Image (cartoon, rainbow, N blue to C red):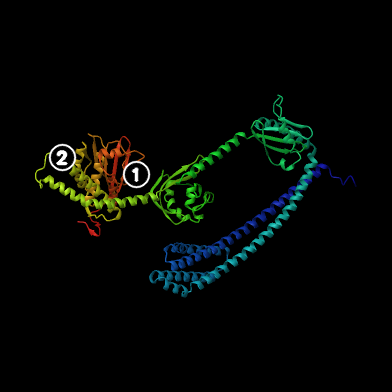
Amino acid sequence: MHDAGKIPGTWRHTLAFLLAFTLLLGLGWQGMRVQQSLLEANAEVNHSLELITVIQDMQLSLQDIETGERGYVITGQTAYLQPYHQARERIAAERESLQQLLELRGVAADAPLAELDALIARRLEISESNIAVRESDGLEAASLRLMAAGGRQTMDRLRLTLEQLEADERSRLAADTRRAEAQAEQARWLGLVGALLAAGLLLAAFLSVSRNLRLRRGLALEAQHREARMEALLAAVPDELYRIVPGQGVSRLMHSEQPPPPIDPDFVEALSGRLGDEEDLLHSFMWHAPSGDEFEVRMLPTRDGEYLAVCRDVTDRLRSRRRLRDQQTFLRSIVDSDENLIFARDISGRFRMCNQAFAAFLGVSPAQLEGRCAAELHHGHCLLPLMAGDSELLAGKPEQRDMALEVQDADGQTRCLQLLKRPLTLSDGSRYLLAVAVDITERREMERMKAEFIATVSHELRTPLTAIRGAVSMLNSGVAGSLPEDAAPLLEIADNNSERLMHLINDILDIEKLESGGLSFHWERLPLGPLVEAAIRDNTPVAASFEIRLVAEGEPLDALVDVDRHRFAQVMANLISNACKHSPPGERVVIAQTFHETEWLEVTVTDHGTGIPLAFQPRVFERFAQADASDRRRTGGTGLGLAITRALVKQMGGEIDFSSTPGQGTRFRVRLPRRDSSSVIAGKETL
């Protein structure tokens, strides 16, 4: 009986494999069923979550409608109507999504939806009425309307209805979740039991068949692999490797047949002193060699009771880090010593660097400002004017300049800044906006005081100068009889210089009137061509006095512009005389007229002189600005002509700019809007 009950070892192994395979098939089939059930439960949970999200979105939209309505009724500011209109646009889509999700869930909610629709319509009607009353009758009537219209009661009923829908769906969600958890728990237990049985059967069969053979082969292969890895590691790793045997000492591991160099005794002592401290074995420490080099050492225990130390030379890295830190400190000191406002922002709007002057402007320290956005600062609203135009710079504009930008500081004082912003791209591709702002508040105040003083003095000088010119003119006309021959040149000098002085005073008074808005204009709609031709004709004698020839380029344009013909003549006279003064004798000044982008007419005045120095170009249109004082003595002038010209062009709705290359000449461009003969000037039709 004993012999019959025996099962050969091969049959035992085969039976074990068959049983394990059958069990695995059953577990797979059960797993597929559980997976399908979990997928269905997950879909139900997702539908519930989407439905709850839509309900919450409807609550937020209704809240935005109520907030926008009340904000507008209380303040009358149209900014509160933006969230109101946006919420009204969202509410219909959210209501449609709610109905679709309820239908997918198979929930019959016609009655709650009908009630919800009626309440929403009622609430929107109340909001529209309150806003209309606020627009037509004012705050008091709108406030009374707001309290009596029933908007709050309607909102309370809406919240109750939506909260009831949400509560019902959460109950269904909880039930689905519990059912999914129960199925998952059952699957875990079945899977665990089946996996344990299958693993036991397979493991027993596997071990009984090949335990000894695989063990020997694995040990041999592992030994070979370890030896190969160790050789490759020793050959490839640039770090120094040391073997530490407690009680025997330290030896260097080298993939070489040559004897290793001796080890520093201080280094051996540092390694041996950390053998008993397990915490040091899990962390690296720094070793400072007597030569001044620095090494990072990491000690790790091996399974055979020995230790492995990896020593890496980090001297260059640490020195580079220190140099970088010193350079950062040096640059920070330079930036902080500058009284101008300097800051840099990344593309997300966060300040990455600023100097002490900029931080003091906002009443904070650089540490409190760096890493934060303007919206996170107490006085962040003060920075809004400084951020204008950032999108254009990030889109590719090379730089942005603002010659006079008024900004309030942290103390509420208005300060005038000259701003320069440029984009900056680093080697890693990160982009920043670098800005430098110069405080010109005191300079502007001094210029204002200077302008007031000059205007006052000019008014006072005009009367006696008129009398002097009249007296000189009478003497020249012979009212006082014939004059000695020696007196005639003196009277001519007096007459010429009094005329120059009168031009200076007139320029100063024109500037004062333009700035105060007191300069009168007589508007006419005229063709551009005759105006330019008249300007060339009137300024030909001036050009001849400088031995310059005026040349008209291109055909005259018949297109119309709105101008004061005398002020336009003044603009052209300033540009032409300026070009003649800065051209060498025998050269020519070219005056051309063209269309610019179909909606503008452009007049250009081009000289072939020495050009405008690059450093002076930003100040060309400033008052009393001249590139060289010696040039003023040679050519005459007050430095007011271009400032008056720009102001007059601006008053006529136009633009003026220039381009200049030192040594090649300058071109001034005046652009005026093109007009239609049927449109109106100053409220009257043009004939």
Of callouts 2 and 1, the N-terminal one: 2
Q: How far apart are marks 2 and 1 (CA)?
A: 39 Å
Point out residue 114 in the picture as x, y percentages from the top left corner. Answer: 51, 70
Crowd band around label 1 with a 10 angstrom C-alpha radius: few (<14), some (14–19), many (20+): some
Three-letter code, disc 1: Arg
Please identify the residue farthest to the top as the structure is shown.
Answer: 258
Q: Looking at the image, can residue 605 be seen?
A: yes
Name the residue nearer the viewer: 196 or 87: 87
For label 1, the residue is: 619
User: Measured along the vertical axis of the image, is residue 158 above or below residue 572?
Assistant: below
Point out residue 41 in the picture as x, y percentages from the top left corner. Answer: 63, 59
- The kind of secondary structure element at disc 2 is helix
User: Measured along the vertical axis of the image, is residue 603 above or below residue 49?
Assistant: above
Point out residue 630 in the picture as x, y percentages from the top left corner. Answer: 29, 38
Horizontal arrangement in the rendering, residue 194 relative to residue 76 (left or right): right
Q: Looking at the image, can residue 225 be seen?
A: no
User: Measured along the vertical axis of the image, is residue 92 above or below residue 347?
Assistant: below
- The kind of secondary structure element at disc 1 is helix
Three-letter code, disc 2: Pro
Q: Viewer-nearest of labels 2 and 1?
A: 2
Horizontal arrangement in the rendering, residue 62 relative to residue 537 (left or right): right
Horizontal arrangement in the rendering, residue 124 relative to residue 544 (left or right): right
Horizontal arrangement in the rendering, residue 92 relative to residue 1 (left or right): left
Point out residue 35 in the picture as x, y percentages from the top left corner. Answer: 65, 55
Name the residue nearer the viewer: 444 or 42: 444
Q: Quadrant of residue 522?
A: bottom left
For label 2, the residue is: 489
